[in-house]
């Protein structure tokens, strides 16, 4: 049965799992705002805000799906949450708890991990290291704090290369210079696309990264360490707009990854530890990677909100 139509604002293919779940259950995607029964978007700030406001005026519910694998913190003092939002879907319980702690005002619904197939942790040799630096924004700008994090991690790993301990690959978005790094003949460089591919992750023994790449690696069961997890979440496309989260101290203990290459006296020993066991990160993985996407739960939850606003879904919207 054709239940109705939805308009989706896809971001880097991250809406794919949600779209497929809706289509499998009888909903159809439309490119027409006027024909859509509801809107699915990754964000309600910047360029997306006007869409959300217009949807509200037309009586169309708006739902947010995860813009990134990391808990979304932009509403913690960096942007005001849009008042006219029906609900937001999040990956796991830890994401919802982070948002509750900083005071996010709208309903949060946990529906699972959509980014890739999950795998159990397997110990590996600590040899083939993949560094995924913080990447520039779409306009090519990267904050100095993120550039410095990249440089410090790179220098530590270069020292291990010099000592013959590891083989290093850097997977980067945009130019290597835009990431605050430089080329070295002893290092392999891979310029990638923001498409959530795990192919390079799967080929390496241990991943050093932050945000989505690191979360993908953990979901794939790969030994992973992060970088400068003590720095508060932040955003901005230029020095003038750069800012930090306002209530970091309220959820820092929950969100920080336990293994940080820039917060240890012996970085190589930390890499070795990460490659041997996932005991120290098991609780973190449960909180922030969680269970695989539950398509049925997602659709049932979304339709529950639609019924509250518009009544039972009985007749096809032709």
Image (cartoon, grey):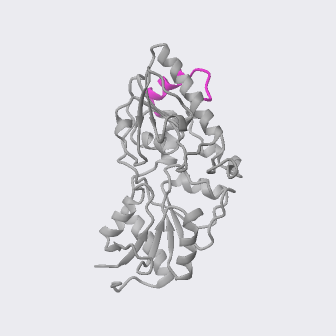
The quarter holding residue 74 reads bottom right
Give, as a single range, the part of the protein colored magenta.
Answer: 262-278
**The residue positioned farthest toward the left in the image shown:** 1
Residue 107 at least partly seen = no
Q: Is residue 84 above or below residue 108?
A: below
x 65%, y 38%: residue: 145
**Of 108 and 244, which appears nearest the observer?**
244
Q: Is residue 145 above or below residue 27?
A: above
Q: Is residue 35 left or right of residue 225?
A: left
x and y percent of residue 64 in the render? 51, 64
x and y percent of residue 152 in the render? 60, 28
**The residue positioned farthest toward the top in the image shown:** 163
Q: Quick check: is 270 in the magenta stretch?
A: yes
**Of 131 and 256, which appears nearest the observer?**
131
Residue 209 at least partly seen = yes
x and y percent of residue 281 in the render? 51, 37
Q: Is residue 315 left or right of residue 227?
A: left
Q: Is residue 215 above or below residue 187?
A: below
């Amino acid at each position: 049965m054709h239940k109705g139509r939805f308009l989706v604002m896809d971001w880097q293919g991250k809406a794919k799992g949600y779209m497929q779940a809706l289509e499998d259950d009888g909903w159809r995607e439309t490119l027409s705002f006027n024909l859509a029964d509801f809107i699915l978007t990754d964000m309600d700030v910047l360029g997306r805000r006007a869409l959300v406001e217009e949807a509200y005026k037309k009586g169309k519910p708006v739902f947010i799906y995860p813009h990134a694998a990391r808990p979304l913190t932009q509403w913690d003092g960096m942007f005001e949450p849009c008042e006219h939002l029906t609900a937001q879907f999040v990956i796991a319980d830890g994401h919802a708890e982070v948002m509750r702690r900083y005071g996010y005002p709208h309903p949060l619904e946990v529906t699972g991990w959509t980014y890739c197939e999950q795998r159990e942790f397997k110990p590996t040799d600590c040899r083939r290291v993949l560094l995924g630096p913080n990447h520039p924004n779409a306009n090519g700008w990267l904050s100095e704090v993120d550039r410095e994090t990249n440089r410090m991690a790179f220098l530590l790993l270069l020292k291990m290369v010099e000592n013959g301990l590891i083989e290093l690959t850097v997977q980067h978005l945009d130019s290597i210079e835009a990431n605050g790094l430089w080329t070295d003949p002893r290092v392999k460089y891979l310029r990638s696309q923001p498409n959530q591919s795990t192919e390079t992750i799967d080929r390496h023994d241990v991943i050093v990264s932050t945000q989505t790449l690191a979360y993908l690696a953990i979901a794939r069961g790969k030994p992973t360490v992060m970088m400068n997890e003590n720095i508060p979440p932040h955003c901005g496309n230029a020095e003038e707009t750069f800012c930090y989260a306002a209530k970091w101290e309220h959820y820092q203990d929950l969100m920080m990854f336990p293994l940080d290459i820039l917060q240890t006296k012996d970085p190589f020993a930390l890499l070795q530890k990460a490659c041997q066991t996932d005991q120290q990160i098991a609780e973190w993985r449960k909180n922030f990677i969680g269970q695989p996407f539950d398509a049925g739960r997602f659709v049932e939850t979304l339709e529950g909100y639609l019924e509250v606003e518009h009544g039972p879904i009985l007749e096809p919207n032709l």
